[in-house]
């Protein structure tokens, strides 16, 4: 194998990268791993992604492409378990990974772990294999807790202290940390005392082949939006109605309740909010949101469509007039890139990298927080613009052309090579 081609063990212990996107624990990180691994594979690097078996029906090996594959390993039961419980099975995960590696005579140049649970497994493996370990946290426990402290009404549990302590320790022990934003770099330094030189900022990307601007009317027809129950009930002409889109996991930190409340300020517009995301484990949260919609008397304007296939999402983004990201926290905010790539403007809170992705007043608005009246104001502004045409969709898309996964993978490989070179010189 040529020297420049790398053999990478990627770890995604708790969440399966080929799992259903938009469910409780499967979202942006899974997209990141699939896309980056595929791009690295296309460049001739060999990537094995290790994840825990979540379903007895899981095949052991999935090929992503010629050089990238996903390998399921048993850790604990063969079912979905709470992600914190995965911590208890990490040693079994590592030991099964090592057995698989030996049986198949595999050797890796480096480890690339995702999320703190995988980073814990990565620490065991870096000691066993004497190879460098790069990690990406995707979310930081300390930041989540700080947000919950500031917004004490957000439902749900705070992150346990042992996650915070473990993340602090991981930052010291692994060789390098990749973060998607300058903001996360600052948080890593502030909360965990990370060394600046150990961190590199590489943004996330968007699949520009998949996420394309389609004709709005055709996209709506394809999705059968005219047939949505509440539209019939209201007797509206669906193709003229404004569509607000939310795409994401149904998680209190996504602030969907604030968006539902925002609809109560928008009664003068014929609109509907289409919510994409949330699997069988999100039914309780969806019920609560439905109740909230009733309290604000906007229930007829909200449709929960459940999970949508990643490959189908460009229809939803193209059918929408605006996509809203009312989150309290995003590590990056892939949905914004996807929507813009489809030519649809975005209204979002100032989280993740959204301030640098969205061009204020041109491709959408970034707000200082998710206060419903603030969201409503900017949604109203965008919805009252004349109907967007192909040219304006193209101009919006052009602003995200630089975020192709191919460029992101190149940046990751450059980081891997620097870390590898410095590791080799430190042990020689
Ligand atoms: N997604 C999907 N189907 C759904 C809901 C979400 O494919 O039903 C995808 C979405 O397109 C995006 C990812 O899940 O690529 C969510 O990533 P984001 O960074 O917005 O949020 P995170 O999950 O990291 O909080």
Image (cartoon, helix red, strand yellow):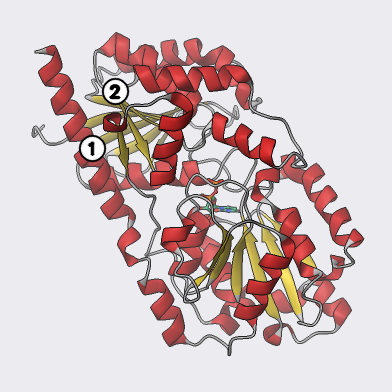
Which residue does the image show at 34% across and 59% down from the upper left? 403
Q: Where does residue 115 sit, x and y in percent of width and height?
A: 48, 30
Asked whether mark 2 lies closer than 8 Å to ligand 1, one says: no
Q: Where does residue 335 sit, x and y in percent of width and height?
A: 52, 57
What residue did someone put label 2 on?
A: 175
| Nearer to the camera, 163 or 36 | 163
Mark 2, other Cα within 10 Å: few <14 / some 14–19 / many ≥20: many
Give the vertical position of 378 relative to 291 (above or below).
below
Q: Is residue 18 visible from the viewing direction of this image?
A: yes
What residue did someone put label 1 on?
A: 415
Which residue does the image show at 85% across and 60% down from the upper left? 293
- Which tag, 1 or 2, sits closer to the chain's start? 2
Based on the displayed image, in which of its 4 quarters is residue 97 positioned?
top left
Q: Answer whether labels 1 and 2 touch (C-beta < 8 Å).
A: no
Q: Is residue 22 left or right of residue 74?
A: right
Give the vertical position of 137 relative to 422 (above or below).
below
Q: Secondary structure at mark 1?
A: helix
Q: Where does residue 179 sit, x and y in percent of width and height?
A: 38, 39
Which residue does the image show at 60% across and 76% down from the upper left? 321
| Nearer to the camera, 220 or 27 | 27
Give the vertical position of 141 relative to 359 (above or below).
above
Q: Is residue 91 left or right of residue 181?
A: right
| Nearer to the camera, 112 or 192 | 192
The image quadrant where one finds the N terminus is top left
Q: CA distance from mark 1 to mark 2?
A: 11 Å
| Nearer to the camera, 55 or 116 | 116
The image quadrant where one finds the C terminus is top left
Based on the displayed image, in which of its 4 quarters is residue 48 positioned?
top left
Q: Secondary structure at mark 2?
A: loop
Give the vertical position of 21 relative to 293 (above or below).
above
């Amino acid at each position: 194998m040529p020297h420049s081609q790398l053999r990478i063990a990627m770890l995604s212990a708790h969440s399966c990268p080929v799992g259903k996107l938009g469910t409780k624990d499967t979202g942006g990180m899974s997209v990141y791993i699939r896309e980056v691994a595929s791009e690295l594979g296309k460049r001739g690097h060999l990537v094995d992604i290790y994840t825990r078996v979540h379903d007895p029906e899981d095949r052991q090996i999935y090929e992503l492409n010629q050089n990238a594959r996903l390998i399921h390993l048993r850790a604990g039961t063969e079912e979905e378990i709470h992600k914190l419980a995965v911590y208890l099975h990490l040693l079994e995960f590592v030991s099964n990974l090592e057995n698989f590696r030996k049986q198949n005579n595999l050797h890796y140049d480096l480890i690339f772990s995702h999320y703190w649970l995988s980073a814990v497994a990565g620490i065991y493996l870096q000691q066993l294999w004497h190879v460098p370990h790069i990690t990406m946290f995707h979310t930081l426990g300390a930041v989540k807790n700080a947000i919950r402290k500031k917004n004490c009404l957000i439902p749900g549990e705070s992150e346990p202290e042992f996650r915070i302590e473990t993340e602090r320790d991981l930052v010291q022990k692994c060789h390098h940390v990749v973060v998607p934003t300058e903001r996360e770099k600052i948080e890593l330094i502030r909360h965990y005392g990370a060394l600046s030189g150990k961190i590199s900022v590489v943004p996330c990307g968007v699949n520009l082949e998949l996420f394309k601007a389609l004709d709005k009317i055709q996209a709506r027809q394809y999705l059968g939006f005219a047939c949505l129950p509440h539209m019939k009930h209201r007797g509206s002409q669906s193709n003229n109605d404004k569509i607000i889109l939310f795409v994401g996991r149904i998680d209190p930190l996504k602030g969907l309740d604030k968006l539902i409340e925002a609809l109560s300020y928008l009664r003068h517009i014929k609109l509907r909010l289409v919510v994409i995301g949330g699997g069988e484990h999100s039914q309780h949260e969806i019920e609560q949101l439905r109740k909230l919609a009733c309290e604000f008397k906007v229930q007829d304007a909200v449709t929960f469509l459940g999970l949508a296939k990643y490959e189908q999402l460009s229809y939803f983004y193209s059918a929408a007039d605006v996509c809203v990201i009312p989150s309290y926290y995003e590590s990056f905010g892939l949905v914004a890139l996807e929507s813009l790539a489809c030519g649809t403007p975005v209204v979002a809170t100032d989280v993740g990298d959204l301030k640098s992705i969205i061009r204020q007043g041109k491709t959408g608005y970034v707000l200082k927080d998710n206060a419903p009246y603030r969201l409503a104001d900017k949604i109203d502004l965008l919805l009252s613009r004349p109907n967007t045409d192909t040219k304006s969709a193209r101009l919006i898309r052009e602003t995200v052309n630089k975020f192709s996964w191919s460029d992101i993978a190149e940046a990751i490989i450059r980081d891997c090579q620097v870390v590898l070179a410095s590791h080799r010189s430190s042990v020689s």
